[in-house]
Image (cartoon, grey):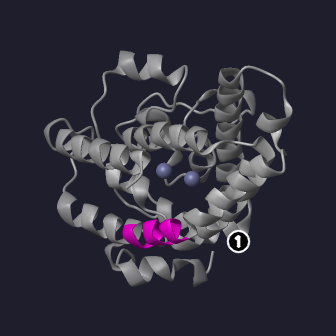
Amino acid sequence: MTIDTLIGLIVLTALFALEGALPFYHNDGNRYRHALRNLVLAGAAGALGALMAPLLLFSIRFAAEHNIGLCHRIDSQPIFCAVLAFILFDLWMYAWHRANHEVGFLWRFHRVHHSDPAMDSTTALRFHPGEILFSTLLNCLILILLGMSLSMLIFYKSAMIAVILFHHSNLRVADGLDRRLRRIIVPPSLHRVHHSHLTDETNSNYGTLFSFWDRLFGTYRTRRRYDDIQFGIGAYQGPDSQGPMKLLTLPLRPL
Ligand SMILES: [Zn+2]
Ligand SMILES: [Zn+2]
């Protein structure tokens, strides 16, 4: 088990326990059933991700052996390069997430994530394996372009999994703390807006780890109130659309 997976499991367990004690939304549904449904999909996506991991390792080795990619080409302190690669990889995540909303073919897969009618830490892991397939293939290219090392990638993925579990969580975070966090990272409030059933709100706040990309590219959106957001995408958020087979075949259904 890699360190980022271990961090993910620890943070998920802690958040799931805290969500029971300090929820932001009082969910009428069964949160264990909701979690199980999301974790079944996460298992399928995670298995595919594990099968494709050698491709990521190959890309990292390929860039190092051929001395290509930003970090292998610039003559600077390793720490400067690591920070730069970390920030640029997060910019790539912003661009990829935005493309998932703006390209119809990609949205067919990404809407599986958005069709969750409730939102908690397990929603962070609810992705269609097809989305994992496309993102992993493109990540290989980005790793080569950036010349990232394995330790840089694991460091980014460890930070990313902790932040995405946190910003999907149904945890009551003090308003002041949430506002302070918003200046740097994506806290729950911003990502709750992104999961709204209203299209204008869904197509905003694409940031994964840092919130400043949305400010920079004009997609940053806040709300006066966050406790009345309705999650989901309308047509495919009903209980009869939430079974594993329904979610796995959702990309085939009409937009
Ligand atoms: Zn999205
Ligand atoms: Zn999300």
Within-10-Å neighbours for mark 1: few <14, some 14–19, many 20+: few
Residue 131 to residue 92: above or below: below
| Residue 120 visible (yes or no) | no
Q: Nearer the viewer, residue 51 or 37?
A: 51
**Where, by quadrant of the figure, is residue 247 drawn?**
bottom left
Q: Residue 221 at x, y = what percent? A: 59, 33
Q: Which residues are magenta?
A: 43-51
| Residue 115 placement, left or right of 19 | right
Asked if residue 73 can be seen in this view, the reply is yes
The answer to if 44 sits in the magenta stretch is yes
Q: Quadrant of residue 20?
A: top left
- Residue at coordinates 71% horizontally, 68% vertically from top-left? 104
Residue 193, percent from left and from top: 50, 41
Query: Looking at the image, which residue is at 69% across and 64% down?
Result: 137
155 drawn magenta: no
- Please name the residue shown 46% across and 21% down the image: 181
Of the 4 image quadrants, the one containing the N terminus is: bottom left
Q: Looking at the picture, does residue 54 appear above or below residue 148?
A: below
Is label 1 within 8 A of ligand 1 (CB to nearest ligand atom)? no
The residue at 41%/84% (across/down) is 245
Please provide percent x and percent y for residue 87.
67, 31
Q: Which residue is disc 1 drawn over?
A: 105
Give SS at disc 1.
helix
Task: Name the amino acid type tagged 1.
Answer: Phe
Residue at the extreme front: 65
Instruction: Name the spot of residue 232 as percent of width and height, x first.
Output: 45, 59
The chief SS type of the magenta part is helix
Side of 28 relative to 194 (left or right): left
33 relative position to 201: left or right: left
